[in-house]
């Protein structure tokens, strides 16, 4: 098929329709980049590397290996849905600028709006309603944090801020609604092996809870808003991850 501007634009539309979850991850990744490196240009080749830094699995990272034509169109759709990202995304002038993207924009925005509406509707359920998201890969445990802090306060704090940002980004990428009632949080810690002690692994819940507050998913992690948490552990050599489930409880 000829790679004319119209065909490239339609290819981007099809990618969004067929990969709604990857599209949401792409939007979230761009928003995270804007948060940590405002005014820096986000380039096509950066997407894979930054996804790796956030702890995504290799499979998820590969979603962001776009060719030049596809990224040229997708970057324009990202700006249509997130105009606030114009400080980091600067598409080069091309024949795509002569295309009326209205039809594609309706499809993209329609998909995003449907996902957001689903998330907002989930937030109205009150007591018993659950919301979940996943953090790919492992997080530093207590031993790693103590070791970094022993080197210097600055290094320990940098680790804390990085992992908190990572948890916040994952929660935002999952389009969780804002929750104002008290919650119980369950953590499923999926490790690649059984080398780390469970109390060492579960220490990372501090990063995750602070990330939920930073992302404004929960109001605070004090006892009035967080009434409890539970932990379970599993092993998956190919896909370590942390699955977080937030359950609303009656005030």
Image (spheres, grey):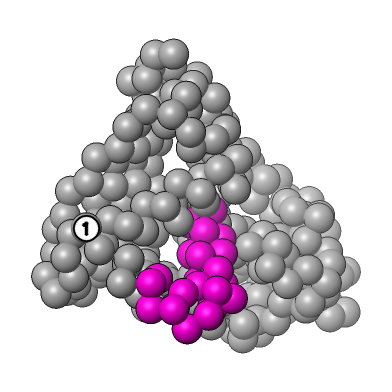
Left or right: residue 201 versus residue 75 is: left
Q: Where in the figure is residue 173, as x and y percent of width and height?
A: 53, 53
* Rendered image quadrant of residue 131: top left
Q: How many marks?
A: 1
Residue 84 screen position, x and y as percent = 81, 55
Which residue position holds label 1? 199
Q: Work out whether residue 62 can be spotted.
A: no
Identify the residue at image location x=69%, y=54%: 104
Q: Nearer the viewer, residue 186 or 59?
A: 186
For disc 1, the neighbor class at 10 Å (few under 14, some 14 to 19, many from 20) is: few
Residues 97 and 156: in front is 156
Q: Residue at x 37, y 27 (%)?
A: 227
| Visible residue check, residue 88 | yes
Give 103 or 202, whichever is nearer the viewer: 202
Quarter of the figure with the N terminus: bottom right
Q: Residue at x 52, y 59 (%)?
A: 164
Q: Quadrant of residue 178?
A: top right
As drawn, is 178 to the left or to the right of 243?
right
Q: Position of residue 83 (x, y in %)?
A: 81, 55
Residue 52 in the image: state x and y as whole percent: 47, 78
Residue 159 part of the magenta-drawn span: yes
For the residue pair 22 and 30, the one nearer the viewer reads as 30
**Residue 220 to residue 96: above or below:** above
Residue 247 lies in the magenta-colored region = no
Q: Main secondary structure of the magenta part?
A: helix
243 up-or-down from 51: above or below: above
Residue 98, quarter of picture: bottom right
Quadrant the C terminus occupies? top left
Q: Which residue is located at x 59 percent, y 47 percent?
A: 215
Magenta part of the protein: which range?
Answer: 145-168
């Amino acid at each position: 098929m000829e790679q004319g501007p119209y065909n490239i634009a339609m290819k981007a539309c099809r990618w969004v329709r067929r990969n709604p979850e990857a599209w949401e991850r792409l939007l979230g990744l761009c928003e995270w980049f804007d948060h940590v490196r405002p005014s820096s240009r986000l380039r096509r080749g950066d997407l894979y590397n930054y996804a790796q830094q956030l702890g995504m699995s290799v499979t998820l990272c590969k979603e962001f290996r776009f060719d030049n034509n596809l990224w040229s169109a997708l970057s324009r759709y990202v700006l249509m849905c997130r105009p606030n990202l114009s400080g980091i995304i600067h598409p080069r002038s091309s024949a795509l600028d002569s295309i009326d993207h209205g039809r594609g924009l309706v499809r993209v925005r329609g998909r995003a709006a449907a996902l957001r509406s689903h998330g907002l509707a989930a937030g109205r359920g009150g007591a018993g309603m659950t919301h979940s998201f996943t953090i790919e890969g492992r997080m530093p445990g207590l031993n790693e944090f103590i070791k970094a802090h022993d080197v210097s306060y600055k290094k320990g704090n940098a680790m804390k801020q990085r992992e908190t940002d990572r948890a916040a980004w994952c929660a935002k990428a999952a389009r969780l609604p804002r929750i104002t009632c008290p919650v119980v949080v369950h953590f499923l810690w999926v490790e690649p092996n059984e080398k780390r002690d469970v109390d060492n692994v579960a220490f990372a819940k501090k990063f995750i809870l602070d990330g939920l507050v930073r992302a404004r998913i929960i109001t605070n992690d004090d006892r009035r808003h967080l009434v409890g948490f539970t932990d379970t552990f599993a092993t998956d050599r190919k896909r370590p991850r942390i699955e977080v489930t937030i359950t609303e409880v009656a005030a």
